[in-house]
Image (tube, rainbow, N blue to C red):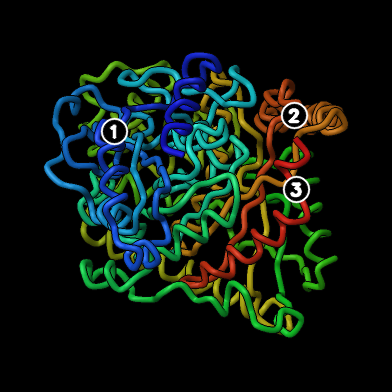
């Protein structure tokens, strides 16, 4: 299986031309040979025995770089495996490749000057998403059976949706990030990076979660909440007695947010009908003030006004889009305020909302205010979750993004504000998964064109342009996001599994 994965990875690079590889791990064959010396008893206790696995390059492997897509960090190999790498190897897995990510990990694609261009396996003209885009594209291309990515604003779910694979961003503090090289680890407040599995099928996500949520991890990292995989939440003994109440929405109906294109709305509705046919109760849900969730999420990353990000990007070769973001971050706070108003007037309110999150905090008093705002928002969402109907929701289905994979040359001013759909659940700290359910069809494109014309007549130039940018998205995957309250990751996986069985995305290819 290792040789087959290595060969398919070479095929994906040389013949498909999709990119996504950071490095082959040369010791993989040696590790595979060592597994042959294991006793039968140890093999039976190792659920990942012999499984090749890919790792996003920030998931540290001893002797290999974790440059986070930055030229300045090349040639600085890790001295030791991070904790999750160590656990995977102890369970019999074989890390065999490291996969690409964008500079600093804060981007919606995964192209970078170290590893080059990363494209979508379904269309070389479109992005794989980011920042775990190397994982998404290589798993979708059958170059890796499964892998680990990271997520702090949608970085697992977005590439999973764009590339048509399954991905889970677990509850914060559910999986250890000890020993990892993540640039956001020390300067982000109220959002902790989530390490999570990506694969073509939900069963493989479950396999990896079961393998990682063990006493070994809990004993080696006291910051992790010691909750083993809860089988009763994932597969109830009496399924009919455990029907779920599931919320749903297809769009943020807010002038400060990007509106979902018709293909996205149709696919969420398809997921709703699938789950209703399974006997679950589906009810409408409206996330309170999604524009506020986005502002709080961006501000969590830019508490210092983006100074940490600027330090990382300083001196790096940047694309036009990266350079534009870099220049915005460099502006002093009063200039950002003016710039946000001007761009908001020129492009639209979603752009203004995105820039407003980069203002940063000017004092300790503002930091205290920000903390209160985050806690107040979390409580508001929880009260809506438990009180909007006669019983609390068990889960939620909604868009991963309001768009499908954009073209690589699309201006980020029209795509970056869309991450509010994923970042809302990072600022809440809730587990969220992404599952491919459908593909863009001709009728979707016709509806998108008509909607773009309608939006222009209404004066919504920004959302009209977003819709127009989806004109050549025929046959691209469409993912649905599945969300549950903290530490109910198994409920997310249960809903994903049920959707997967009936949607049959890969069987309908």
Residue indicated by mark 2: 475
Q: Which mark is in front, 2 or 3?
A: 3
User: In terms of depth relative to the viewer, which is nearer, 352 or 477?
Assistant: 477
Q: Is residue 154 visible?
A: yes
**Where is residue 373 shown, x and y percent of the image?**
41, 65
User: Which of pointers 1 and 3 lies earlier in the amino acid sequence?
Assistant: 1
**Where is residue 132 shown, x and y percent of the image?**
44, 38
- Whether tag 1 and tag 3 are in contact, CB under 8 A, the answer is no
Quadrant hosting residue 216: bottom left
- How many marks overall? 3
Q: Could you tell whether 316 is left or right of 505 in the image?
A: left
Q: Which mark is in front, 1 or 3?
A: 1
User: In terms of depth relative to the viewer, which is nearer, 373 or 213?
Assistant: 213
Query: What is the secondary structure assignment of the residue under circle 2?
Result: loop
Residue indicated by mark 3: 504
Q: Is residue 373 visible?
A: no
At label 2, counting other C-alpha atoms closer than 10 Å, the crowd grade (few under 14, some 14-19, many 20 or more) is some
User: In terms of depth relative to the viewer, which is nearer, 415 or 398?
Assistant: 398
Q: Which disc is residue 25 wearing?
A: 1
- Whether tag 2 and tag 1 are in contact, CB under 8 A, the answer is no
**Where is residue 55 shown, x and y percent of the image?**
36, 41
């Amino acid at each position: 299986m290792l040789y087959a994965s290595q060969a398919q990875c070479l095929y994906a690079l040389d013949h498909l031309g999709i990119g996504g590889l950071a490095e082959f791990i040369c010791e993989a064959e040696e590790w595979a040979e060592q597994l042959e010396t294991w006793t039968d008893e140890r093999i039976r206790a190792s659920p990942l025995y012999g499984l090749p696995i890919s790792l996003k390059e920030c998931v540290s492997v001893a002797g290999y770089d974790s440059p986070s897509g930055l030229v300045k960090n090349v040639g600085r190999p890790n001295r030791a495996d991070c904790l999750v790498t160590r656990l995977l190897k102890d369970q019999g897995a074989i890390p065999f490749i490291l996969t690409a990510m964008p500079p600093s990990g804060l981007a919606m694609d995964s192209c970078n000057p170290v590893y080059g261009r990363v494209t979508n396996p379904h269309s070389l003209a479109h992005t794989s998403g980011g920042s775990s885009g190397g994982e998404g594209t290589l798993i979708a291309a059958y170059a890796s059976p499964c892998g680990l990515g990271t997520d702090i604003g949608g970085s697992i779910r977005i590439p999973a949706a764009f590339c048509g694979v399954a991905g889970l961003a677990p509850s914060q503090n559910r999986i250890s990030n000890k020993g990892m090289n993540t640039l956001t680890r020390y300067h982000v407040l109220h959002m902790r990076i989530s390490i999570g599995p990506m694969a073509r099928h939900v069963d493989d996500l479950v396999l990896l979660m079961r393998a990682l949520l063990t006493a070994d991890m809990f004993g080696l990292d006291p910051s992790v909440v010691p909750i083993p995989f809860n089988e009763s939440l994932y597969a109830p003994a009496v399924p009919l007695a455990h029907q779920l109440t599931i919320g749903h929405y297809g769009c943020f109906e807010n002038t400060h947010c990007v509106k979902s294109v018709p293909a996205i709305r149709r696919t969420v509705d398809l997921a709703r009908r699938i789950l209703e046919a399974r006997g679950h109760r589906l009810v409408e849900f409206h996330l309170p003030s999604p524009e506020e969730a986005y502002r709080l999420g961006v501000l969590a990353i830019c508490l210092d006004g983006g100074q940490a990000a600027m330090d990382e990007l300083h001196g790096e070769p940047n694309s036009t889009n990266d350079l534009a973001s870099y220049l915005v971050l460099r502006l002093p706070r009063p200039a950002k305020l003016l710039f946000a108003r001007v761009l908001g007037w020129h492009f639209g309110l979603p752009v203004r909302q995105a820039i407003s999150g980069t203002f940063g905090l000017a004092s300790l008093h503002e930091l205290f205010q920000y903390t209160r705002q985050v806690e107040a928002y979390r409580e508001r969402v929880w009260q809506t979750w438990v009180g909007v109907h006669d019983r609390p929701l068990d889960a939620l289905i909604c868009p991963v993004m309001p768009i499908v994979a954009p073209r690589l040359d699309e201006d980020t001013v029209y795509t970056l504000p869309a991450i509010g759909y994923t970042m809302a659940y990072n600022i809440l700290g809730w587990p969220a998964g992404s599952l491919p359910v459908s593909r863009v069809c001709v009728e979707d494109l016709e509806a998108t064109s008509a909607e773009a014309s309608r939006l222009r007549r209404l004066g919504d130039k920004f959302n009209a342009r977003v819709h127009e940018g989806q004109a050549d998205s025929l046959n691209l995957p469409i993912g649905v996001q599945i969300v549950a309250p903290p530490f109910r990751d198994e409920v997310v996986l249960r809903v994903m599994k049920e959707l997967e069985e009936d949607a049959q995305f890969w069987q309908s290819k």
